[in-house]
Image (spheres, grey):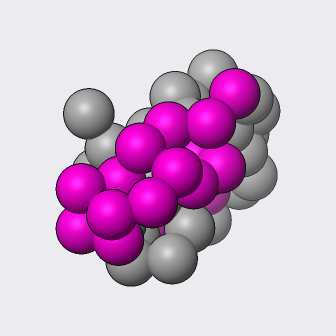
């Protein structure tokens, strides 16, 4: 499902955002946090890493 990115002004394929906080939590929980990855919403533009509406 495509979403429109205002910043890029084009339709993009949304991706899941994995910021530094995600990886820090993954390390702190011994990888258990990685199990939450599929639960994350796909709301990030792959080009500008901006939040999609
Ligand atoms: Zn974008």
Residue 45 x, y percent position in the rendering: 46, 59
Taking depth in this image into account, of 49 and 8 the one nearest to the observer is 8
The verdict on residue 11 being magenta is yes
Q: Is residue 47 above or below residue 26?
A: below
Q: Would residue 5 appear left or right of 37 to someone viewing this image?
A: left
Q: Which quadrant of the render holds ligand 1? A: bottom left
Q: Is residue 21 above or below residue 44?
A: below
The range drawn in magenta is: 1-26
Taking depth in this image into account, of 49 and 23 the one nearest to the observer is 49
Q: Quadrant of the C terminus?
A: top left
Determine the image quadrant of residue 35.
top right
Which residue occupies 57% across, 54% down? Answer: 12
Residue 29 x, y percent position in the rendering: 60, 48
Which residue occupies 65% across, 49% down? Answer: 13
Determine the image quadrant of residue 33.
top right
Which residue occupies 24% across, 68% down? Answer: 7
Taking depth in this image into account, of 21 and 18 the one nearest to the observer is 18
Residue 11 x, y percent position in the rendering: 52, 51
């Amino acid at each position: 499902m495509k979403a429109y990115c205002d910043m890029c002004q084009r339709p993009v394929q949304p991706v899941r955002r994995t910021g530094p906080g995600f990886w820090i939590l993954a390390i702190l929980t011994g990888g258990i946090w990685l199990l939450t990855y599929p639960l994350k919403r796909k709301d990030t533009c792959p080009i500008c890493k901006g939040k999609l509406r």
